[in-house]
């Protein structure tokens, strides 16, 4: 019995590891795709249009958005969390894409042949960390401002 339980736990852990690896590969694929300027501008355009549509729906139809939100969270809290995560992700990826427009060499440092390669790598790593942090802040701000705008337009705060 113990061997059977151990086999099932190993199988479960293996599935989670594979799923995490697939997610990491997907994120890396999209981050690497942003090194192409044309693809980057396409990402920015799509994300900006989707974000603008979300903002427009909150500003123009606040009652319908509130009713839809209530219906979605009444059905399942996970659905409400997913909607918030999607809006956060759109804001975060839009912020990151805009930073990649300004810093195109963000993810591919080439410092092997330079004299101060370790110092430049450290500076580059710090810049990349800050840009990811600011992108996360951009996603959080997008969600917070949408919620505050919805509250103001619907409840008249």
Image: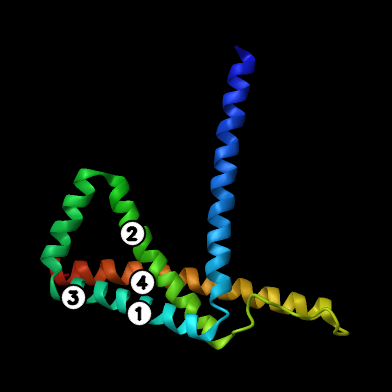
Mark pair 1, 2: CA separation: 17 Å
Where on the picture, by quarter, is residue 53? bottom left
Front in this rendered view, residue 38 or 80: 38
Furthest-right residue in this view: 115
- What residue is drawn where x is 76% and y is 76%? 121
Between discs 2 and 3, the one toward the N terminus? 3
Between discs 4 and 2, the one toward the N terminus? 2
Whether the residues at callouts 1 and 4 have beta carbons within 8 Å, the answer is no
31 on left or right of 108: left
Furthest-bottom residue in this view: 102
Placement of 71 over or under 112, stated as above or below = above
| Label 4 SS | helix
Measured as percent of width and height from the top left, residue 3 is found at: 64, 17
Measured as percent of width and height from the top left, residue 83 is found at: 31, 58
| Label at residue 48 | 1
| Label 3 SS | helix
Colouring rule applied to residues: rainbow
- What residue is drawn where x is 21% and y is 68%? 150
Mark pair 2, 3: CA separation: 17 Å
Front in this rendered view, residue 3 or 142: 3
Instruction: Classify mark 3: residues with Cα within 10 Å, few (<14), some (14-19) or many (20+).
Output: some
Measured as percent of width and height from the top left, residue 5 is found at: 58, 19
Front in this rendered view, residue 148 or 79: 79
Circle 3 residue: 59
Between discs 1 and 2, the one toward the N terminus? 1
| Label 1 SS | helix
Instruction: Classify mark 1: residues with Cα within 10 Å, few (<14), some (14-19) or many (20+).
Output: some
Placement of 101 over or under 149, stated as above or below = below
Instruction: Classify mark 4: residues with Cα within 10 Å, few (<14), some (14-19) or many (20+).
Output: many
Circle 2 residue: 84
Where on the picture, by quarter, is residue 105? bottom right
Circle 4 residue: 142
């Amino acid at each position: 019995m113990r061997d059977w339980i151990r086999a099932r736990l190993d199988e479960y852990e293996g599935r989670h590891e594979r799923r995490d690896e697939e997610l990491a590969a997907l994120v890396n694929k999209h981050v690497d795709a942003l090194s192409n300027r044309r693809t980057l501008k396409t990402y920015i355009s799509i994300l900006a249009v989707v974000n603008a549509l979300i903002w427009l729906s909150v500003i123009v139809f606040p009652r319908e958005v509130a009713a839809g939100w209530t219906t979605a969270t009444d059905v399942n809290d996970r659905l409400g969390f997913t909607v918030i995560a999607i809006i956060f992700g759109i804001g975060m990826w839009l912020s990151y894409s805009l930073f990649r427009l300004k810093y195109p060499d963000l993810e591919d440092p080439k410092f092997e042949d330079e004299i101060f390669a370790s110092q430049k790598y450290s500076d580059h790593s710090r810049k990349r960390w800050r840009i990811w942090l600011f992108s996360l802040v951009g996603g959080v701000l997008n969600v917070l401002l949408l919620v505050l705008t919805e509250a103001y337009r619907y409840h008249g705060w």
